[in-house]
Amino acid sequence: MADGTLAAPRPAAIDGTRANGMQRFARRRSTIAFLMALPLLLVVLGLVAYPAGYGIYLSTLNRRMTANIGLGNYEILFDSDTFWDVAFQSCVFALSAVFLKALIGFWLAHMLHHIPAKGQRKWRGMLLVPWVIPPALSTLGWWWMFDPTYSSINYILNIFAVPSVPWLGEAWWARSAIIIVNVWYGAPFFMIMYLAALKSVPEQLYEAAAIDGATSWQRLRYITLPMMANIISITVLFSLIVTFANYDIVRVLTNGGPRDLTHVFASYAFQVGILAGNIPRGAAVSLFMVPMLAVCAFFVLRGVTRRNKEQM
Amino acid sequence: MAQVSLRKLVKAYEGGVQAVKGIDLEIADHEFVVLVGPSGCGKSTTLRMIAGLEEITSGDIAIGGTLVNDIPPRDRDIAMVFQNYALYPHMSVFDNMAFGLTLRKFPKAEIKRRVDEAARILDIAMLLDRKPKALSGGQRQRVAMGRAIVRDPKVFLFDEPLSNLDAKLRVQMRTEIKKVHQTVKTTTVYVTHDQIEAMTLADRVVVMNHGVIEQVGPPQELYHHPATRFVAGFIGSPAMNFSPARLEGDAHALRVVLPNGTALPVPEHRAARYAPYVGRPILVGIRPEHLTDKKPTDKRNIADFPAIPEVIEPMGMETLVHFWMDGHEISARLDPTCPVSVGVPITLAADMDQMHIIDPATDKVL
């Protein structure tokens, strides 16, 4: 009896401790933060992690998706000349388009930055127009302008006695046309990011540099660019990912032609996976860009972290 | 090394607002001149015009005898220390200091020699590899000064360089700046709103107000012989006491009569100067340190000044007593050992040799 009396409170005490522990756990800032981020995490898991995992699984299946063939799809792709053309075109397209977007975006941002605030808003709004038009729609407009018979661009070239250009008929010109449209669409994004970055550079750094003897080019080289390095890196990385995965411009403008020479990974994956009905191989094509972009992202983000630690 | 000349210098902004209204100033070679005044008085604008960071509306600026109106900052051979230091955050301390020399294509060995020398003078040799982020406010200030020193320019320009430092560090850096100037002897133009900084650092102080120069002179001259009511009130801490008063008597026995009826005899040697103002309203100004509890035995012109303390501030080395006379606050500096209580009348000693009489119509000290 005495034992029972003594023993009785023990489970209650344990329950009490457990309840307190749960309350403390629920009240912890990290727990609250996790719970608040949970909906987003579920969206990311559902829309990114699951499709990515399923894509990897699909890429290991045979065409009928009845048997696992391991890396068989990748081996077939590595032996395909068309695939290497697509890989080459994707790299040329993404690198040159991103470079030109960054260059033009920076130039526009620099010009805008030096316009007085009142006029700046008007120009900024106008220059952002290409970015806010749905790319499939604006590409259709470009397609008409590149049309071999009614090309308005060729019409203007002819006025200046320049012969017509087979914009979408020859590989080199078709590739150039895709890059032009992508740059037209994407440069305003760079412009707006760089404009924000330019505005965040303290004016006194330029004044100090001017007194130190820097010319305007040297101020750009030694002050503006290093101070914008993080924004430039992150914008380039972001744009590289989006441009590598570009689909709509190629699909509307050339549909991969002529002779599959303007395909990029996304449009080729669609052609192989959906149009040709080989979903596993299409998955293998689309997964090919992941390791390349992962390496880029690793180096870019490492640089950003290092600069943040040193400067902020 | 060079002299700086400002002639009829004007800066007007859009809308016609004049920040600087035609000032003239000659700064001698090796001189340390401090521009001081309240916010918006035009002191920083003047400095920025000397630097070439601000276009001048009219007038001339000459450095070392050369007219620099249209010469860009990089060719004026000046160095500037900014209020927020303006260190390049992506460069190490060494690179920050060497930047100006690198741009001017100095040999690497010479750059290193100069940076090391400046770092030694400023005691920052151990910081040369660090980035500005890893430095304290005082260390950043030293680096900013180092960046100016290595250039060995004709003129140093300082734009409120100590404003961002805490009170203790400000005093320490003030001494450092004075020491550096005594070492390198470069002509220096220094802008501050802190009159103590101005008084302690300057060979000559330029007091500015509303875009004009109120007075130029050595610190002691400004303190003892202010030209205007503004200078009298701006220089000195705590500020000079002002009270409306009336001059009575004749050229042989003048006295200042305060609103509460207190009559203070005017020293004989000043009577002739003030005689034309007898019967007219005047302002009398006397500094708190000349209104004390002790009557110096070696002075003749000491007057009794009755007061009833309303606020007492013991400062350790002195006690400040505040009282109001006809709505005007008057402060007095008392010996800390002086027994004083709120509401208990005391008789203070006013040193009439140190009082100033101001014409309220012109605000000029008579």
Image (spheres, grey):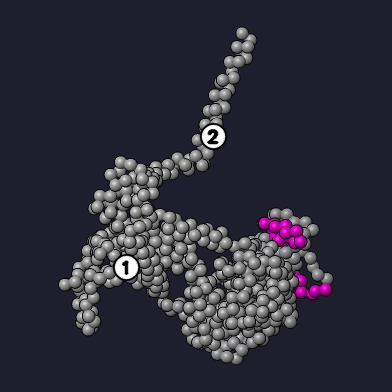
Near-viewer residue (B365 or B49): B49
Looking at this view, name the residue that lies furthest to the top. A1
Residue plotted at (61% across, 72% down): B95
The chain carrying label 2 is: A
| Classed neighbour count for the residue bearing mark 1: other residues with Cα under 10 Å, few (<14), some (14–19), many (≥20) | many
Task: From the image, tell me which residue sits under label 2.
Answer: A24
Q: Position of residue A215 (x, y in %)?
A: 50, 80
The image shows residue B34 at horizontal and vertical percentages of 63, 77
Q: How many marks?
A: 2
Q: CA distance from mark 1 to mark 2?
A: 57 Å
Residue A113, located in which quarter of the rendered image? Answer: bottom left
User: For the N terminus of chain A, which image quadrant?
Assistant: top right
- For the residue pair B69 and A228, the one nearer the viewer reads as A228
Element under label 2? helix
Is B315 within the magenta? yes
Tell which subunit mark 1 falls on. A
Query: Which of the 4 image quadrants contains residue A98?
Result: bottom left
Residue name at image x 45 percent, y 59 percent = A296
Q: Is residue A133 above or below residue B34?
A: above
* Coordinates of residue B243 in the picture (x, y in percent): 63, 69
Q: Is residue B98 magenta?
A: no
x then y, percent, for residue B263? 69, 70
Q: Mark 2 or mark 1, which is nearer the start of the sequence?
A: 2
Task: Provide the residue designation for mark 1.
Answer: A179
- Horizontally, residue A307 falls left or right of residue A160, namely right
Q: Which residues are magenta?
A: B298-321
Q: Is residue A52 visible?
A: no
